[in-house]
Amino acid sequence: MSVIDSAKSMARTDVCMIVEGTYPFVAGGVSSWVHDIVQGLPELTFDMVNIGSHPGSYGEPRFQLGPNVRSLSVLFCRENDSTQPLRGPARTALARRIRAIRRRPLDEVPSRTLRGIRRLHLDDTVDDELIADLGSGDLDIASFLYGRASFEVLLEINQRLAPSTSFLDLFWHFRAMHVPLLRLLAAPAPPAACYHAVSTGYAGLLGAVWSQASGRPFLVTEHGIYAREREMELARAEWIRDDGEDDGLAGWAPAPSALRQLWSRMFRKLSRIAYHQAARIVTLSEANRQKEIIDGAPADKIKIVPNGVRLAPVAATVGLGGSGAGSDQEPTAAVRPLRVGFVGRVVPIKDVVTFIKGCDLALRRTPLDVRIIGPDAEDPEYATRCRALVETLGRQDSVRFVGPQPPAQIYGDLDVVVLTSFSEGQPLVILEAYAAGIPVIATDVGACREMIEGRSGEDRQLGASGVVTRVAVPQDTAAALVRLAADAGLRRQLGEAGRQRVRAYYQRGDMLDSYRAIYEKEARS
């Protein structure tokens, strides 16, 4: 664990905020939201705890910490060792190690932590005892990896949940699942009046354990639904073997998807642990609220607090681009291409591939000036794939990767913003576009539909502020782009509806007031 400003007073802070893989090192909507909360509530003190993948996975902070941030702690799920399944001699050595463990007599007293790990997989209930067991701190990593008691738990999981799975693969994944938990749970809790996790998963587990141990309240804010996003990633993960390679141990043949289901079950259980311990669960939209209830969150704990932004002056050029004329015609003599922006991280969950394909289809019918605006270092392999797709399609002159830019620079030079994500919470990008009077094309995920069409009768009376498309259907994105390129009047109408929607329902001040009240109730209790 590394600590910035660790010499500051160790007296109890107001809020210990726990994030996973975001603030202050990674740009994006969640990080911007965290920064807004901390900056907007200067009367409160914060300890920030960031959970990262491994040492070296972060560069310099992307955000400057304010004076009310007393400390920044960075915890890592693993050291700089490989997380890939073993091959060749290393795999053979692991098989020998497993055989040695199997011959070892069971002379250990199973730890409470190990009992909690067993319940993560084999017991569907979530209660205070499970959280206390996981947080007991009576199991070190070496005992977990090489102890006979943990091996017995693994055998039971093998027999009950994955009887046809390669035992070596199961052993490897059992290790990869739980070593991060043990590493994180060994970290000391900063003393705080309340603990606030900005997701479930690892952050939610840590907050739940620290809350129970200290007797202080615990809050959860979910932007995207963490467990469901992990399921989407797991479905495509290449590091999970589904093939039939020989593992050198007779009697076990792999079963497709069993390992993926094991991972998915664990992340869903971690979400339920966070929901159980939380005094308040904050979500961004009614769509997310319904998903959380289905996933086990008590309905009476959930409060909807939408994201909020400041309204910006409307740029004089907003809505005037495009290649055709619509109900409000523009001169056709020197019409420029429609300026289209994807704003976000270049990562698989944002489905930039569908965005590029949609723009390619639209470019066959209308001129576009397309910018992909955002960082591309988080998943270099995916970013390379996206750039290669642009080149394969021959669209280098029309589709450009411009990297991260400040919001004032982004939205003053766009006619439409497009999101093609597989999953979202309540994208700040949409609100930032609305604040500048820019319409949005977005997939029907998270809160996007209610942000575009309205979430209540009164809200819907403002009219649509963009176009909703299906997930992973580039033809939908292309049709929406062609339609908006041909009708500048429609773009102005949609953009103005977006500004009115922000003014009525998504003001930054309202969001800060809501969190101020939540913290006042919980942190001051």
Image (tube, grey):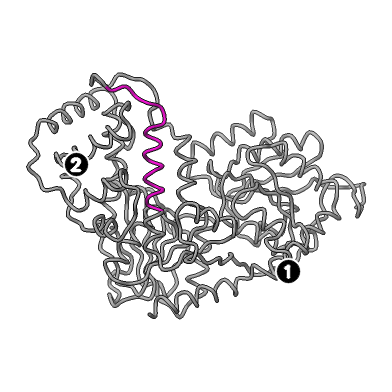
Relative to 243, residue 361 above or below? below
Residues marked 2 and 1 touching at CB (< 8 Å): no
Kindly identify the residue that appears in the image at 70 percent across and 70 percent down. 503
- Residue span colored magenta: 252-271
Disc on the earlier residue, 2 or 1: 2
- Which residue is rendered at x = 64% and y = 53% of the image? 448
Percent position (x, y) of residue 424? 57, 51
Which residue type does callout 1 highlight? Pro
**Residue at 45% of width from left, 67% of height from top?**
280
Foreground residue among 20 and 384:
20
Image location of residue 158, percent across then percent down = 28, 33
Q: Is residue 391 left or right of residue 375?
A: right
Q: Is residue 156 left or right of residue 336?
A: left
Magenta segment main secondary structure: helix
Q: Observer-nearest residue: 61 or 472?
A: 472
Q: Quadrant of residue 81?
A: top left
Res 150 → quadrant: top left
What secondary structure is found at the residue carrying circle 1?
loop
For the point 47% across and 40% down, which residue is it?
233
x, y (%) of residue 50?
38, 58
Q: CA distance from mark 2 to mark 1?
A: 61 Å
The residue identified by callout 1 is 313
Amino acid type at image mark 2? Ser
According to the picture, the residue beneath numbered tag 2 turns out to be 150
Give the quarter of the figure containing the N terminus: bottom left
From the image, which quarter does the C terminus lie in?
Answer: bottom left
The mark lying in front, picked from 2 and 1, is 2
Q: Secondary structure under badge 2?
A: helix
Q: Is residue 261 magenta?
A: yes
